[in-house]
Amino acid sequence: MLVYHFRNQGGCSDRNMNYLGPPPAPQRGSRSHSAVRVRPGWIQERRCLNAHRWRKSVANQTTKVHTAPHRRRRGAGAEAKLERLQEEARRDREALARLPRWFGALVTILAHAVPARLRHISQVLSWPPSSLPPLLRGVVVAVCYFVFAKVSLTLASLHPSASPVWPPSGLALASLLLWGNGLWPAVAAGAFVANATTFGSLSTSVLIAAGNTLEALITAALLKHLKASTQLFEDPPQVVLFVFLTLLPGTMISATMGVGSLVLAGYAEPAKFASIWLTWWLGDVGGKLLVTPFLMLWANSSLKGMGRAELQRLAQLLGLTLVVGLVAFSPLLQQTAARGPLGFVAIGPLLWAALRYNQRDTATVALMLSAFAIWGTLSDGGPFARPNLNDSFLLTMAFVISTAVPSLVLSADVAARRLSEKRHRALVEHASDIVATLDLDLRFTSVNPAIERILGFAPAKVVGTSLRKPVPQEQLHTYAEMLDRKLQGEPSTQYEVEILTKAGARRILEVNSKLIADATGKPIAIHAIARDITERREAMQAEAQVAELDHRVKNVLATVIAVSQRTRDGRTSMDDFLSAFDGRIQSMADAHSLLSGGRWQGVNLAQLVHQELAPCMAPLNTKVDGPDIVLTPDATQPVALVLHELATNAAKYGALSSPKGHVSVQWRQQTSGHAPGTLVLDWKETAGPPIPASISPGYGTSVIKELIPYELGGAVDLVFAPEGVKCRLEIPQKWLKDANRPLS
């Protein structure tokens, strides 16, 4: 009997696994002679054989081999087993080939199903996280973890406990984020049972389960501490934070504890620590990045809110993903050198989902494409197939992760921009002010509905029309001036304009506008916000009028009091006082009537002179002459009182007290001298009674001499000449309504 000794050195291994049977048939030219073509059923059988032989080699490093005839019989049995496994793999491929047709039929049914029926189905498929009892949650998580783990471990080739594809890590993290960290015993139980029934001892299974549990707990705790778990995948910073926490702390701890326990217990070679650790870590990272977003986003959404149109759009996306996955990765198509680059076509559905759909659909597409890529790699096909199966899976997961992560970030960014645009649109649509954009020719390119409420124009009919249509012609220069200021570099302009409404009424708008430039800085449009301030202007005008009225009433009352007090001085009888007081008050009332008739815009000087002379005026005893001049309201009362005193004195003591007397009142505006534009009024009496040489001045004389200088800043020259009274009044130009009119 011959005795052979061997060690587990991997020198004659198939994809780094020891195989003691006869060497399989060599692969095509691109493969090494020691490589075999792996099929799904063959991998499961190989894993069981290799796990059994691994334990046997650890327990006893020597094996006795019987005689050569017996060894030849063993070789013949292994060849028969290989043929049987290849037949099983062929049947599996035929079953997998029918999957696309089943999936297409399912999509068609969903897209054309009755919406009410879909809502009923959604009640079953869209359980809220809080609807499951705690114990049932734990059972569901533990069972799902165990099933996913056992399926994933069938893909292990470098070591029975290290799979490059590990969805349970994503399931565990999603469960803790949805249902709380108190669910960690379920994760630990599922991980322990899966590892205990696969490879290693109870102690290594405990340590591996502890590492898997700590991985999920640490990542979930960090996300909750950073307040990212409630807004996960909603914006790019949250996605980047999730990816960072997936790469670094938890997955590294799990890989280190798992591989370290196997090496220390003698179930893994120390020389392979780094390669096993990388496989373990990348599998956990891929599971989190692909499975967690899928579960989280679908758990936070529901089919209840999806209408028929949205379901059809989703079915189209999934159908496109199915076709791309089959073309790029499926082993059903013959693998050729030209088919290798087709793997990059998978980026198309991911970008389309990120730009046109939402984060949930993007995560779904990423998971589907990763499943197709794993399927192709598992069948020793696809663009990522390598001589070593573990290397093939590592390359597949690296490609899937490198495409899924940017797609999730892009999808979150597009969703955030879409939400911001939606909020901005709602703000503009419901704004009380007119918000519009115009081109540089002042044509509307967009406008919100507020224009119909304020001006009466429908937004759809305004777009494309010119702003010059509703703007009065005298206001167009304001727009041209504001546009010119903006083009010269002023960032924004604010001005008030009048706009004609659809009914022809005038509205006052306060406009704030700024230029919109393209990427090169060239102005291309105008953004404007117009606020209707018509009521505010009317209210301000009313307040100003009330204030003006209050001021004038106070002035009138003060004047009445002063007139009353000064009229009383020197009066010897009540009748004399009342007569003089009544005349002065009546003069003020008449002046007030003239102001009211002119809406307080001013009083014509000729009307005022005729009104004061009217009680004693005859056809031949007066002469009134002068240009058309309007006094301001504030100048009317002082001039009226002075004219009243002059007329009263002339009627009692001067020219108008005699039938032959004559009064001339003439005025003009100076065209030269020290004060051009000053109003000069000359009062001249002739042919009246002789004037005494000495006259004791009374209140009337004081009013004539002092009121104009005091109230208006003018000058008065009063002379009691023997032939008659002469008086010259000089009133500054600012008290004339036409003060800015050019002098002739």
Image (tube, helix red, strand yellow):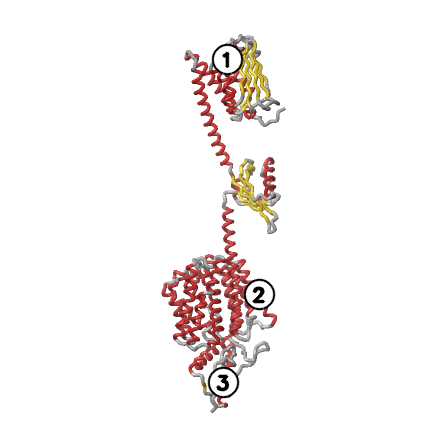
User: Is 561 in front, or is 621?
Assistant: 561
For this view, does 268 lie left or right of residue 516?
left
Which amino acid, mark 1? Asn
User: Is 657 in front, or is 376?
Assistant: 657
Q: Residue 652 at what x, y percent from top left?
A: 50, 11
Local SS, label 3: helix
Which amino acid, mark 3? Gly
Q: Earlier in the sequence, mark 2 or mark 1?
A: 2
Which amino acid, mark 2? Val
Q: Which residue is mark 3?
A: 77
Res 563 label: none
Res 345 label: 2
Relative to 701, residue 414 above or below: below
Q: Earlier in the sequence, mark 3 or mark 2?
A: 3
The single residue placed furthest to the right in the displayed view is: 744
Q: Earlier in the sequence, mark 3 or mark 1?
A: 3
Q: Residues within 10 Å of mark 3 (few under 14, many from 20)?
A: few
Task: Mark 3 vs mark 2: give the one in front.
Answer: 2
Which of the 4 image quarters holds residue 665?
Answer: top right
